[in-house]
Amino acid sequence: MATAKLILDGKEYELSVIEGTEGEKAIDISNLRNQTGYITMDTGYANTGSCKSAITFIDGEKGILRYRGYDIEDLAANARFPEVAYLLIYNHLPNQAELSEWRRQLTLHSLVHESMLNFFDHFPPTAHPMSILSAMVASLPAFYPDMDNVDVNIMRVLAKAKTIAAISYKKSIGEPVVYPRTDYSYMANFLRMMFATPAEPYEVSEVLENALNLLLIVHADHEQNCSTSTVRMVGSSQASLFASISAGICALSGPLHGGANQAVIEMLEKIHKDGGDYKKYVNMAKDKTSNFRLMGFGHRVYKNFDPRAKILKKACDEVLAQLGVKDPLLDIAKNLEEIALSDEFFIERKLYPNVDFYSGILYRAIGIPTNMFTVMFALGRIPGWIAHWKEMHEDPSLKIHRPRQIYTGHRKREFVPVWQRP
Ligand code: ACO
């Protein structure tokens, strides 16, 4: 077995090496502080493994992404989202009977407690749908307090999140809430709850259903990213599945993470309004004195290409053609990508379009409003968060997550009161 040697203050220490099934290697430092008095420092955790996990494999150099051993390209081309959710959570693809029951349960659990509807009425109309989603998911334990029934709670959060998302949209535009139906699929139910009105019949379009299915699948998991690590961090205190997922939603909302899909469309709209001068924006992104970044570009792990961005770029062409939509933002995005990929600044830093670069164009084509893009990401990511929360709780060696720090503040000081007690 390979080991690593560390020489510190003239003393030699042997550290064991851990190897994953795909040959990834780690130096085990779990006893380092006890042995040496030192900790390691890795701001942003770029070189730190926080756990062993059997859910998702990424090779950022080769652009490989696999859920439970299945290539993302295969799943995106052939699977349905509920099937992928089952795979991530239970580590095997469901057979016919398991899939039928899983789908039935997901539709049965789609309704939210009627009292929850009161909450929606008291958010200001300007409330961001991500705030509403995280608040509503955080309040689920109040309505469903039985925390021991993990499998039922898994179905509850998966099924209800899409209903919560659609209700928040209906409330924001002042239309009546559309209730879920048990005879509709996950995707069809969501589209119906979003877009049906009492004014006219609504038929779910197969093109939109398939586009949504693809989007949710490519977002379903991405190993130890910021929001998933948050779910694990919160869950490590034995906080409930609902509380942990609500925390994940909050982490996802930031523009450097899931919030980037909204930021990309806002950026493309700005370039469009500005006469389509995308070169100006590429130059701004290179200018270190401007705070501007090309949103939807760059990734901590992918250093060649993001396979999800490839899948979505192709889907943009196909779906827009099927719908007969011509979106000028798609042309701007493609031009931006082309010019950035041939520019030394982006080549040197290995900056490529990430999943968020093209997803917004598809969401727009489906009719999802821009401020709901990150909610869509969250709906896709919920199975991944559940899988990680479950994997962590099934590990008998689970410990509360508690990193260390190097303190750089004041040394001990005397307290001198500025006022006298009367
Ligand atoms: N535009 C311009 N320059 C960039 C960009 C960008 N989008 N991304 C990184 N850079 C530059 C940085 O300025 C830095 O340059 P320097 O070495 O000269 O200082 C270098 O590339 C490395 O960037 P870091 O911020 O150190 O990379 P990190 O791995 O920490 O960040 C991140 C990755 C957050 C995704 C970053 O690339 C970014 O901000 N991208 C834009 C936001 C975005 O699209 N986020 C979605 C990520 S995918 C997801 O969460 C689903």
Image: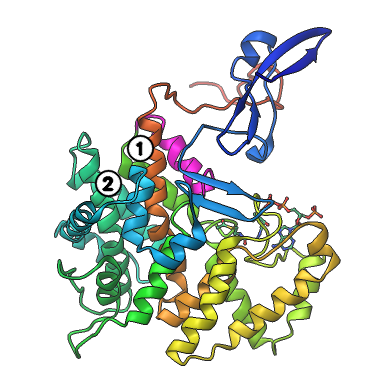
* Residue 122 seen anywhere in this rendered image of the structure: no
* Residue 421 seen anywhere in this rendered image of the structure: yes
Residue drawn at the location 30% of the way across and 58% of the way down? 161
Mark sitting on residue 154: 2
Task: Name the kind of residue labelled 2 in the image.
Answer: Ile
- Residue 387: quarter of image: top left
Q: Nearer the viewer, residue 191 or 38?
A: 191
Which residues make up the magenta segment? 222-238
Q: Secondary structure at mark 2?
A: helix
Residue 248: image location, x then y, percent: 43, 48
Residue drawn at the location 20% of the way across and 70% of the way down? 184
Residue drawn at the location 78% of the way across and 9% of the way down? 12
- Residue 272: quarter of image: bottom right
Q: CB of mark 2 within 8 Å of CB of mark 1?
A: yes
Mark sitting on residue 390: 1
Question: Is 403 positioned to the left or the right of 237 in the image?
Answer: right
Q: Secondary structure at mark 1?
A: helix
Residue 62 in the image: above or below residue 267: above
Residue 168 in the image: above or below residue 232: below
Indicate which quadrant contains ligand 1. bottom right
Q: Nearer the viewer, residue 39 or 347?
A: 347
